Amino acid sequence: MKKIVSIVLALTMVFALAIPALASSYADVADDAWYAEAVEALREKGIMNGMGSGKFGPDETFTRAQLATVLYRMAGSPAVTGEDSFTDTERDTWYSDAVLWASQNEVVNGMGNGLFGANEAATQEQLTVMLWRDAGSYQLDREKYASAEGVENQASDWAFDAVVWAKVEALIADLDAYAPTKAASRAQVADMVYRYMKLKEQFANVDAVSGATQKADEQTTPTESTGGKVLVAYFSATNNTANIAKHIADATGATLYEIKPETPYTTADLNYSDSSTRAAREQNDAAARPAISGSVENMADYDVIFLGYPIWWGQAPKILYTFVESYSFDGKTIIPFCTSGSSGIGSSATNLQKSASEATWLDGTRFDGSVSEDELRAWADGLQ
Ligand SMILES: Cc1cc2nc3c(=O)[nH]c(=O)nc-3n(C[C@H](O)[C@H](O)[C@H](O)COP(=O)(O)O)c2cc1C
């Protein structure tokens, strides 16, 4: 079974990062170095250049001004006006626009006391925090991560959320080599920035979906027009499914219900590259039914249930089985949806269906980060 898990892992996790067969442009970057793809991609996009003489300097440090410049270029170097309010930055110098842009967009916050520290070596947690801020300073559910164990606990308090975020989003290439308060190497900068750019690309349209503010009572969906009361029940370990679920609820006027595990999943529990983690053990145990905290009030009132989950090794997490086996769905319609790194919904919904065969199940749908608000609404409107 372990072997099968490894093979499935190897196949399904290919979505993580594809490595093109590109020769390195730098004499000191081996073609097969772990950061080679990132270095080459950022060079091609003009975001991060070498150090001259055909060298990239992977082990060298990177200053905070250089880092702001990389992030500014990543944003397309938009025109800026004004002056930054730091007391230690030079005016009209090579990094001025970048630092101004970064402070105006809250990508940098300075080092306290009005200082920016342009020439200081950027630490790994500073790099992480800048990317996290660029991503919108995603706030952690602190309760969920209270027992987090790992690099985040070596980070400064102000960097904790950012480091957990970077771990969850797989932006850190090697957790063992990650030392939050130490200077970031140029290789780390390139690799992390590149991973972040790919993540941003993947979830480019989630922001558009998040911006959906249309009120449910301004909309008509088949589920409403047939008079059915609608529930959106979802499980989400890292918030991707939660985002989609919330917008389906907005679009349909449904009640939102989160399937919360009694024992929350830690980052380590979700490490899909380790077949001994909690998630892997549960998925491999046909009898596993992780306990749910709380329950749906008045399930009998609902006629239509959107049921959302992340794909875990091609299937629905076992907690979904706990959920569907906890209620009677007689006379109800279930509409499964999922999010995943790349896998389709596959047999995940039809397997789940076997545990609640009394319901009418519609075909399941997989959404990724690029689903647009219109697509989501059209999908909900098109359901019969
Ligand atoms: C334990 C585990 C296993 C995963 N297995 C797959 C997989 O087989 N195929 C895939 O495309 N993505 C896989 N992923 C990625 C998730 O499906 C994807 O990130 C999903 O959007 C997470 O949703 P959530 O944030 O709502 O938990 C896996 C993630 C985890 C944590």
Image: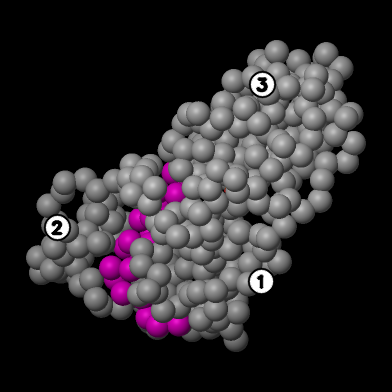
- Residue 189 occupies which quadrant of the picture? bottom left
Numbered range of the magenta stretch: 181-205
Which sits earlier in the primary sequence, circle 1 or circle 2?
A: 2
* Residue at 32%, 63% in the rendered image: 190
- Can you identify the residue that label 3 sits on? 361
Q: Position of residue 179 (x, y in %)?
A: 41, 79
> Which of pointers 1 and 3 indicates the residue nearer the eye?
3
Element class at badge 3: strand
Give the camera-side residue of 178 and 378: 178
> Which of pointers 1 and 2 indicates the residue nearer the eye?
1
Q: Which secondary structure is most common in the magenta stretch?
A: helix
The alpha-carbon separation of the residues under discs 1 and 3 comes to: 37 Å
The alpha-carbon separation of the residues under discs 2 and 3 comes to: 49 Å
Left or right: where 211 falls relative to 80: right
How crowded is the residue under tag 3: few (<14 C-alpha within 10 Å), some, or many (20+)? some
Q: 327 above or below 61?
A: above
* Residue at 21%, 45% in the rendered image: 20
Q: What amino acid is found at the position of numbered circle 2 in the picture?
A: Asp
Left or right: where 287 falls relative to 44: right
Element class at badge 2: loop
- Can you identify the residue that label 1 sits on? 146
Please tell me the numbered disc located at residue 31: 2
